[in-house]
């Protein structure tokens, strides 16, 4: 199968003409119009078979998740997505209609779900299936939510259940059936919620590498030498799927704190903003702790200090 027949057969129809798309797939570059007084937000993630997903993951799920993790990055800044670029490196045994049609359908389904165009990309051959997605979005000028805005006294919140994807992966590696497989293969980027949090959240990111590690990124970005920041997390306030309650606490906390792959939003906001947001959008956010002065990240269970070693996902 040639590169161009692959593109036209499986990906050309994914340019569905988002209102911002002037030129999509088929030219040397894509052209999109940006609304006045808006800024472009861009992000890229690379997924490698055997590293970021299991070799036996369904092609549809691979395509869906490759886009989802990028839309989650845009959501964490409050951006509204409009387009993606796809870099696809295929081993010879996967360069066939059977794999590519299902993979492309996964991309098509999530693009349709979030009103996003595939506006361009590139394909080549490689020993290992490697997918690179660049996601593009816009946000009103000056309103992007960064990691670096947390302040002492802020409420720490998450947008949904934590630890489900890690638990599902653990079950799969043990050869067990798991009803939480969807959490691992089909994460739901919190795009609409991210936009609602503009003007409310002081800092935000998505949980990809683990709650502990990602909260550490917020603390590092928001701290200064003169004013280091830490956090207190109440483990019993973190929302989880009921299946995790059957685990010993030590195993449960590993999935929650170090597991990652959740793609829920992790954010901080003032008490006043939390109360106001919760009045407008009740039961949308889950408060799990507070930003504190000092440089320590401390975990508590039933108000008792609990030692947890933060590990999280390491890329190397």
Image (cartoon, rainbow, N blue to C red):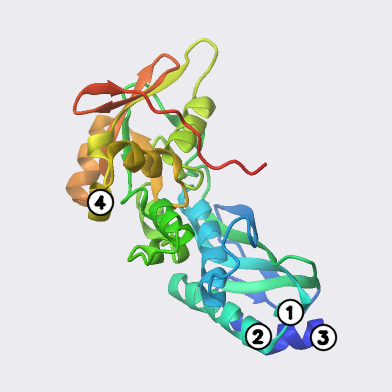
Q: Percent x, y for residue 117?
A: 58, 73
Select label 3 or label 4 by which is in front: 3
Residue 209 in the figure: left or right of residue 47: left
Residue 261 in the figure: left or right of residue 249: right
What residue do we see at 28% from left, 50% from top?
244
Let me know if residue 16 appears in the view. no
Where is the C terminus found, in terms of image quarters?
A: top right
Residues under labels 2 and 1: Cα distance?
17 Å
Residue 299 found in image quarter: top left
Q: Residues within 10 Å of mark 4 (few under 14, many from 20)?
A: some
What residue do we see at 61% from left, 53% from top?
43
Q: Residues within 10 Å of mark 3 (few under 14, many from 20)?
A: few
Which residue is at the front of the view, 268 or 79? 268
Residues under labels 4 and 2: Cα distance?
37 Å
Which element carries disc 1, helix, strand or loop?
A: helix
Which element carries disc 3, helix, strand or loop?
A: loop
N-term-proximal mark, 3 vs 1: 3
Instruction: Please give the residue where the numbered disc 1 appears in the rendered image.
Output: 93
Residue 232 found in image quarter: top left
Instruction: Please give the residue where the numbered disc 2 appears in the rendered image.
Output: 10
Select label 4 or label 2 by which is in front: 2
Residue 101 found in image quarter: bottom right
Q: Percent x, y for residue 137?
A: 55, 59
N-term-proximal mark, 4 vs 2: 2
N-term-proximal mark, 3 vs 2: 3
Instruction: Please give the residue where the numbered disc 3 appears in the rendered image.
Output: 2
């Amino acid at each position: 199968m040639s590169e161009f027949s692959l593109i036209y057969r499986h990906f050309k129809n994914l340019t569905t003409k988002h209102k911002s798309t002037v030129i999509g797939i088929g030219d040397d570059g894509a052209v999109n119009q940006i609304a006045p007084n808006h800024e472009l937000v861009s992000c890229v993630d690379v997924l490698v078979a055997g590293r970021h997903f299991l070799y036996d993951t369904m092609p549809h799920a691979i395509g869906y998740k490759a886009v989802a993790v990028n839309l989650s990055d845009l959501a964490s800044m409050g951006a509204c997505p409009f387009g993606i670029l796809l870099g696809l490196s295929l081993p010879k045994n996967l360069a066939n209609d059977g794999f590519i049609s299902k993979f492309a359908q996964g991309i098509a389904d999530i693009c349709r779900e979030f009103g996003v165009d595939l506006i361009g990309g590139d394909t080549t051959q490689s020993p290992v299936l490697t997918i690179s997605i660049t996601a593009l979005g816009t946000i009103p000028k000056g309103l992007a939510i960064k990691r670096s805005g947390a302040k002492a006294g802020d409420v720490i919140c998450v947008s949904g259940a934590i630890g489900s994807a890690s638990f599902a992966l653990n079950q799969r590696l043990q050869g067990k059936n798991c009803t939480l497989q969807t959490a691992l293969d089909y994460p739901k980027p919190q795009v609409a919620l991210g936009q609602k949090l503009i003007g409310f959240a002081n800092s935000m990111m998505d949980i990809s590498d683990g709650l502990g590690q990602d909260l550490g990124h917020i603390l590092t970005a928001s701290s200064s030498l003169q004013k280091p920041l830490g956090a207190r997390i109440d483990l019993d306030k973190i929302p989880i799927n009921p299946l995790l309650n059957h685990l010993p606490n030590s195993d449960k906390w590993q999935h929650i704190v170090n597991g990652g792959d959740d793609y829920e939003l992790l954010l901080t906001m003032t008490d006043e903003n939390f109360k106001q947001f919760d009045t407008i959008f009740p039961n949308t956010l889950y408060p799990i702790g507070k930003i504190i002065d000092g440089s320590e990240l401390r975990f508590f269970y039933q108000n008792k200090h609990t030692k947890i070693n933060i590990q999280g996902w390491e890329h190397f």
